[in-house]
Image (spheres, rainbow, N blue to C red):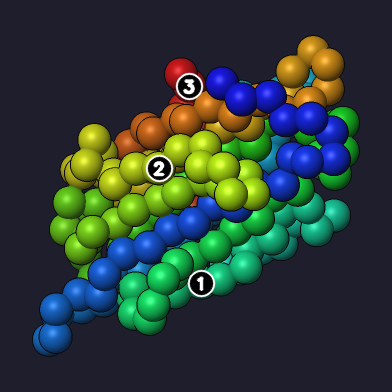
Amino acid sequence: MYGFSKGTGKVEVQLKWDPSPLGTPPSDLDLIAATYFAADPSGEPAYLVHFNSRSPDGTIIYERDSRDGKGFGVDELMTLELDRISDAYGRVLVGVAIQQHDGRRVFGEVLNPEFRILEGYTELAAGDFSDVAGATAATVAEFTRNASGTWDFHELVRGFDTDLNSFARTMGSAHR
Ligand SMILES: [Ca+2]
């Protein structure tokens, strides 16, 4: 568990994977964040941030989307300015969903998927989805507001067997 002091709670979630071999359909992974009201941290998300949805106050930014894992370095990137998030919100989950364009695809079929969660140059967590190889979506990080009003980080890798839309609705059920 990591405590964030006010003013320094800017976190970056990175995702990368390798492109599918020539002649096979691309794998399209997507980062998604769900924010929950402090009064109902396991209920319906207050709002979602993904490739097609922005946070209303700009505290969570979907910086980079990839549809195929091509290119160098980080394929998908999301930044979260936790210290700027309204006190109305008490929990933020970040997950990864695989687009199910060409039939069901699971993490074990994606080449070298990896995530990293950083605060500045400090690595909070990293993983390769091997524990959820049979899942089509997974949470990776949970941030919860503690009694002093700052945020705690928890690595939370839980697999789901669902598409992006239903994952967005149900990912809040993931718990340590
Ligand atoms: Ca994508």
Q: Earlier in the sequence, mark 3 or mark 2?
A: 2
Furthest toward the top, the residue is: 147
> Dot 2: what SS?
strand
Q: Is mark 1 within 8 Å of ligand 1?
A: yes
Distance between the Cα atoms at labels 1 and 2? 19 Å
User: Would residue 33 be seen by someone viewing this image from the given angle?
Assistant: no
Q: Residue furthest bottom?
A: 23
The residue to which callout 1 is attached is 65
- Residue that numbered label 3 is attached to: 175
For discs 1 and 3, the disc positioned in front in the rendered view? 1
Q: Secondary structure at mark 3?
A: loop
Position above or below: 145 against 78: above
> Residue 1, position in %: x, y?
56, 21
The disc, 1 or 3, on the residue closer to the chain's N-terminal end is: 1
Give me the disc on residue 12. none
Q: Which residue is mark 2?
A: 126
Amino acid, disc 3 = His
